[in-house]
Image (cartoon, grey):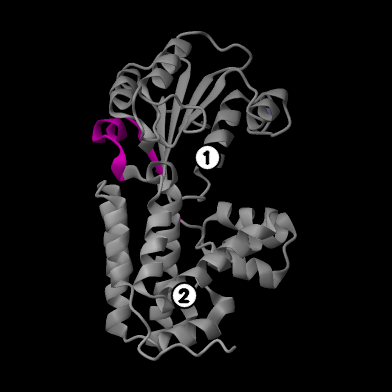
Amino acid sequence: MRTGHLSHAYLIVGPPKAGKGTLAVRLAQALNCTGETPPCEECKNCRRIVSGKHADVITISLLNAVSEEGSSRKEIGIDSIKRLQNDAYLPPFEGKRKVFIIDGAEYLSQPAANCLLKTLEEPPPGVTILLVASREEQLLPTIVSRCQRIELLPVPSATLQIALEEGYSVGTEQARLLSILSRGCPGWALAAIADSDFLEAHYRQVSDLIALEEAGIEQRFAAAAKLTANFSQQREKVDELLVLWLNWWHDVLLVSMGVRDFISHINLENVLEERARLYTMEEINKFLSRLRETRQYLEWNVNPRLVMEVLMLELPSPRIPAKSKGG
Ligand SMILES: [Zn+2]
């Protein structure tokens, strides 16, 4: 922006909660800002954009998308993109530049993606298109090649810790925990600050996982069925859960190897130690590979119920029977 060399289309990629959506909104603000240091966050344009009320900054996401007729998949259909195209040829109404944010570009249906391609090839002047995606590999290569790519990497935990302490008045210990547990995704840490249930839900998912390790096959299959019921609507949630399982088991592996400096669940070290003692390193490694494969299979649209049931069969059971819970 400072040098006046802006691309007409950007693709912002990175893990969930890395700040992709925030960056897109800030960029839209900066392009329309009337203050001295864009984005000033104070001028009328900046304020209207952040509240989603600005007529020239239009976000298309799964929340407001129209699916293809007859499709049961959660997707952004061609009608949403056609509307964008009609709109793109109108001059800005209240700001300086029209900005279209497609949040969740990996959810564009095939016809929608092809339709968008035309706009990306010959964009109307005065228009900026921002594509936001967590799963870049799901995008058409032709779309990726027509955008300038911005990848958001995880923030180093020391940097994030300072930002949480100074910018959000979080205590040192809590800031340290969140900066590590979030694995450098600021949005994760901020969600945990804003909502105390967020962290609790995380710990609940960890203890549910431990309970599954102790459970018999019936309970495990019931869990697989529950996770994959209505899968197209909760695909994202299942993937987030698998990432949580990966992170937890990765911690178990680190403790099992005696490398504690790099674990993320720093406040659950005792539990990790207990769990690490129950499995051989081979079992832990094998299950980590299975988890990675499972995410891949789900991405390839293999039958989710089947995939999760196989994973449940692969989930190792503790060598030593768990301590009796008493009573
Ligand atoms: Zn401003």
Q: Which residue is mark 1?
A: 21
Contact between labelled residues 1 and 2, with CB atoms less than 8 Å apart: no
Q: Quadrant of residue 169?
A: bottom right
Q: Position of residue 47 (x, y in %)?
A: 70, 29
Residue at image point 32% right, 59% down: 308
Q: Residue at x 72, y 27 (%)?
A: 43
Q: Position of residue 231 (x, y in %)?
A: 38, 46
The x, y position of residue 9, in whole percent, is 40, 28
Can the viewer see residue 5? no
The stretch of residues the image draws in magenta is: 137-153
- Where in the figure is residue 37, as x and y percent of width and height? 66, 33
Question: Does residue 36 appear anywhere in the picture?
Answer: yes
Q: Which residue sits at x=36%, y=38%?
A: 106
Q: Residue at x 28, y 71 (%)?
A: 314
Residue tagged 2? 210
Mark 1 lies on a secondary structure that is: helix
Q: Which mark is residue 167?
A: none
